[in-house]
Image: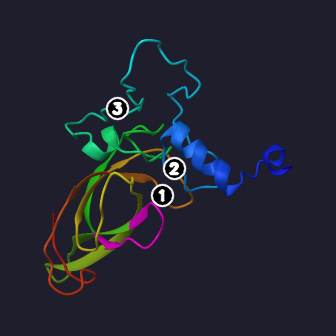
């Protein structure tokens, strides 16, 4: 009874809000896209109801995923459906961890030259990357990521493209240059 005024939505009311907004509601707060007005009046005489969804092209030759155009997820940090612009560096790396919610860890391998011995040594660095729900990510996949504004304490990159990779065994320690 008094829960609606305090912001806590009962389970029955949450289901009706989901149907009205047509968005995935997995959080306690109501999720909606910034560019879409949910209170728009219905047009009379039209039977088909086209669902409104905000999406855009990030540029630099990266295609917008089909899931971003037609999906139901709400992610304000997604470069395709949210308020994040991609600028700066474009990097590639192998996914070594996808255990966090909407964040993955990619491993970037590189060679460092040692002048004294006239040889190279293998090195790596791990980068935390925001991954939109538009991508289905598994360990061992190759991710192309773009730099954006700081999204959290450690996250400064966003996934732009995923390439499936067939790696036998663990993907953690494999050294591949991209």
Total count of labels: 3
- On the picture, is 65 further left or further right than 152? left
Write the start and end of the magenta stretch as one range. Answer: 95-104
Could you give the CA–CA distance between mark 3 and mark 2, rounded to whole angstroms? 20 Å
Q: Name the residue under label 1.
A: 155
N-terminal-most mark, 1 or 2: 2
Badge 1 vs badge 2, beta-carbon distance below 8 Å: yes
Q: Percent x, y for residue 15?
A: 58, 50
- On the picture, is 62 further left or further right than 23? left
Residue 2 in view, yes or no: yes
Q: Name the residue under label 2.
A: 150
Q: Percent x, y for residue 30?
A: 62, 45
The correct choice, above or below, for 170 with respect to 156 in the image is: below
- Asked if residue 160 lies in the magenta stretch, the reply is no
N-terminal-most mark, 3 or 2: 3
Badge 3 vs badge 1, beta-carbon distance below 8 Å: no
Could you give the CA–CA distance between mark 1 and mark 2, rounded to whole angstroms? 6 Å
């Amino acid at each position: 009874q008094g829960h609606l005024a305090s912001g806590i939505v009962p389970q029955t009311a949450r289901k009706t809000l989901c149907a009205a907004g047509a968005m995935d509601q997995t959080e306690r707060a109501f999720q909606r896209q910034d560019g879409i007005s949910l209170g728009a009046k219905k047009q009379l005489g039209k039977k088909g109801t086209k669902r409104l969804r905000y999406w855009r092209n990030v540029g630099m030759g990266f295609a917008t995923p089909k899931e971003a155009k037609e999906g139901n997820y709400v992610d304000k940090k997604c470069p395709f459906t949210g308020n994040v612009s991609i600028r700066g560096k474009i990097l590639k790396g192998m996914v070594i961890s996808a255990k966090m919610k909407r964040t993955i860890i990619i491993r970037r391998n590189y060679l460092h030259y040692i002048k004294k011995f006239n040889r190279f040594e293998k090195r790596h660095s791990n980068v935390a990357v925001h991954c939109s729900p538009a991508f289905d990510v598994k360990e061992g996949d190759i991710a192309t990521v773009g730099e954006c504004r700081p999204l959290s304490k450690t996250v400064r990159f966003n996934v732009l493209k995923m390439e499936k990779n067939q790696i036998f065994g663990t993907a953690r320690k494999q050294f591949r240059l991209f």
